[in-house]
Structures are given as structure tokens and as C-alpha cells.
Amino acid sequence: LILRRGLAGGAPPAPPPFDHQPRPYAGISGDEILRKRKTFLGPSLFYYYQNPLNIVEGKMQYLYDENGKRYLDCFAGIVTVSCGHCHPDVVNAVVEQTKLLQHTTTIYLHHAIVEFAEALASKMPGNLKVVYFVNSGTEANELAMMMARLYTGNLSMIALRNAYHGGSAGTIGLTALHTWKYPIPQGEIHHVMDPNPYRGAFGSDAVRYAKEVEDHIAYGTPGRVAGFIAETFQGVGGAVELAPGYLKLVYDKVRNAGGVCIADEVQSGFGRTGSHYWGFQTQDVIPDIVTMAKGIGNGLPLGAVVTTPEIAQVMSQKIQFNTFGGNPVCSAGGLAVLNVLDKEKRQAHCADVGSHLIERLKSLQQKHEIIGDVRGRGLMLGVELVTDRKEKTPAKAETAVLFEKLKDLGVLVGKGGLHGNVFRIKPPMCFTKADADFVVDAMDYAMSGM
Ligand code: PLP
């Protein structure tokens, strides 16, 4: 046990056993890909790895590089791989549909689209029964915002600071992290305080945050709003769970001002939080519009907006058409995902493994000063690193070093937060307790050497 914990003799932790041999890779090398990427793909601010891995194969919670080295994927692609990399049921559904018919749109009938919509609607509470399919989270939020404005006849949207809702001209206005912003007009979007229990000015006091929303509506809008959008667990913002009770209070205020409430479930949906199928249920609210993507398709390009028949009615005044949204291949894959999550009882599994992991991370926090906060639920966790616990100074440089060290140890985590000082642990939902131990042991080992 001591050896597994990795510290006694300074030995790194042993990875958990996993029965899979990656196929030999005969493609071009990672160095060559990087060279070609620099020539043929447009530049972007490299946010993640300085030397990205050449990942050639994935199997459930593991990824393999060109040399066959195995990595535990604690970031599930980009929180996309809900069931597991190349889960056989999802692969099979996609392959079979691809052989039969790759593409039609909603101008024709296709059984996979309605079967998937029906299955998705069955997962929703209340009267959230009408589904629109799109290709991404950005598109889902763009459509949700348009619906809110059309339905209410109002313009003002309210979003949270530290939120990420997408990168299109409209949704970038909702996003409130300077690193993702572009200098384009972002009219009639108001950002209210982030009810972040660790960093927020009011700690976990939902009442004070909600009062600030009320003030914002009174002073910053015509008093009537189109809608309010929030992730219950802010993802890109650093795995922040909103202060308990916040959404209930704010939804009331927004509805009183004529607005609709939108829950962005792009990261927190599909049972990942363990306690509920959707993140908003952890706050005991029912939104008017729910947006989703990422885990919905286990990595397929797919997104959806689910709303009530009453709100959807406004779309009959407009053309809502999307060339690829709801295509048969993604619909078949999405339906397979829902079936896998149910069949394999992944929500309960997330609760069980997540509580083990969070307990171990909290013990690690007692050992390493650099861990300022451990938070989250199920397999939607954040570990925030600081150089000074009292001041909560973001450990930006240290996080970057640890991130690379973890990679070398075979552990891939996500990074997030405005300062990039939060490890985001959101693995495929097949992640095991042995995997959880391996991550914590690897962190322990990496942090001990700092
Ligand atoms: N909403 C949330 C909460 C997200 O995390 C993301 C992406 O990270 C988006 C929306 C945008 O989704 P996409 O990248 O699929 O456009």
C-alpha cells in the first residue's frame, strides 16, 4: 500500500491494470504532425500542452500515444466522452447507421431522430419535452438565447461572471472569461457576480448573490429581461459549483422580470454529477430551456436544446433549420449513449467513485499546502491550486508544471479557471476507484517533488 501511494521510496505510483493492447501505429510521427499543423492549420493561443501528445487510440477511460504509452484520461476528451472512448455499443450504433444512411435532414423523416428525441425528453423533468438538435454547445446556447428573446419580446440577457457558453458572436457575449473574448459588440448582455463559494465575495451566501441579480435587473436593464443563463457547475471557469440555493432564488427573480431561465448542461448533464441526471436538479429547479452537447454523443458532434411546448411555439414563426443537426448517424450514436448510461448504471457509479475520489483528494489537501480547494460532485471535480491559502493567490506557474508532470506519469487532467490554476477531473463515466487512487497518488507524487 505504501509503495502504491508512491511516496515511501519516492517511486511513482503503479498504474491500475487494464486489459487492452493498442494496435501498432504506422502513421506519421507526432513531430511531423506538429510541423504540418503549424503549416496547414491556423494558429491559436495554445492553452493546453506545450508539446501535445500524438494520441492514436482510445479505449474506455484510457488513451494511447504513438509509442503505445497509456494515459488515464481524466478529462474525457473535453468532457465529451461520457461512456468511454470507443465504447462498443456506441461504435456499433454509429457504424451500422453509417453503412445504411449517412445523412438526411429534418426535411425527410428518419426514425433515429425521433427515437433519440423521445429518449432525451424522457430524461427531462417537468414539461421540458420539445427537442431541437444542433451540432455543438455553442449552437445550442445561441438558439436558446434567440428563443428567449423571441418568446419574451425582451432583449436583456443575464449571465454569470466566470461562465463559458461558447465562442460564436452571440454566445461569446454570454461567456465571461477574458481569455475567450473577442473585441466584437456584445449588446444587452449583463454579467452578474459569480456565486462561487470559494472565491466569490459573498462566499456561499446565495441570498446576497441573488439580491445583486435583482439590483442588476433594476438598474441595468429596462426592468424586463429575456432570460438568465447559467451552468450549475461552471466547467471552463474551473469546476465551480454554484452556491447552494442560488438558482432557486434567481429563477424567481428572473421570471418576475418576464424572463426565461436557461440551464447550460453542456458539461454537467447525463448523470455525471452522480446525485442527479442534470446539474440543475442539484439546485432543485426546473429551467425553461436546457442546452446540452459534449457528453450527449460520447464525442460525436452533437448538441440539443430542450424546452417546453409553449416556448417552442415561438419557433413556428421562424425557420429553425440546421443541415447536420439531428442527422441519423449522430442520432443513432446519441441514442446508444443514453442506453449505455442506463444499462451500465453510470450515474450511480459516478456517485460511488466520485465520493471515494473527493474523499481522497480532501486528504491530499491536508498534506499539500498548494491545494486551496477541492470541490464538485460525482465525476465533475475541481482541485484549485494556490500559492497562499489565505490570500488564495492562484498558483499559475506551479499548476502548469504539475500538469506536465502528471502527463509524464500517465495522467491527463483538464485545466481551467481564469488563471488556469484549477485541475478539472471529469473522466469518462466508466472511471474506477483504482483509477481514482492512481490519480491521487500521481498528484501526491508530483506535488511532493515541488
Ligand atoms: N457551454 C459550456 C458549459 C461549455 O463547457 C462549452 C464548451 O466547452 C460550450 C457551452 C460550448 O460548446 P462547444 O465547444 O461544443 O461549442
Image: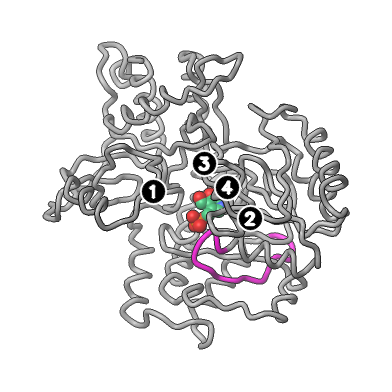
Q: Which residues are magenta?
A: 125-139
Front-lying residue, 362 or 397: 397
Specify whether residue 15 is in view. Answer: no
Compute the Cα span from label 1 to label 4: 18 Å
Q: Secondary structure at mark 2?
A: loop
Kind of residue sitting beneath label 3:
Thr
Kind of residue sitting beneath label 2:
Pro
Residue shown at the point (57%, 31%) measured from the top left? 375
Label number found at residue 16:
none
Compute the Cα span from label 2 to label 3: 16 Å
Front-lying residue, 232 or 12: 232
First in sequence: mark 2 or mark 3? 3
First in sequence: mark 1 or mark 4? 1
Q: Which residue is mark 3?
A: 179
Label number found at residue 185:
2
Q: Which residue is mark 4?
A: 164
Label number found at residue 44:
1
In the rendered structure, the answer to whether residue 200 lies left or right of residue 57 reads right
Specify whether residue 199 is in view. Answer: yes
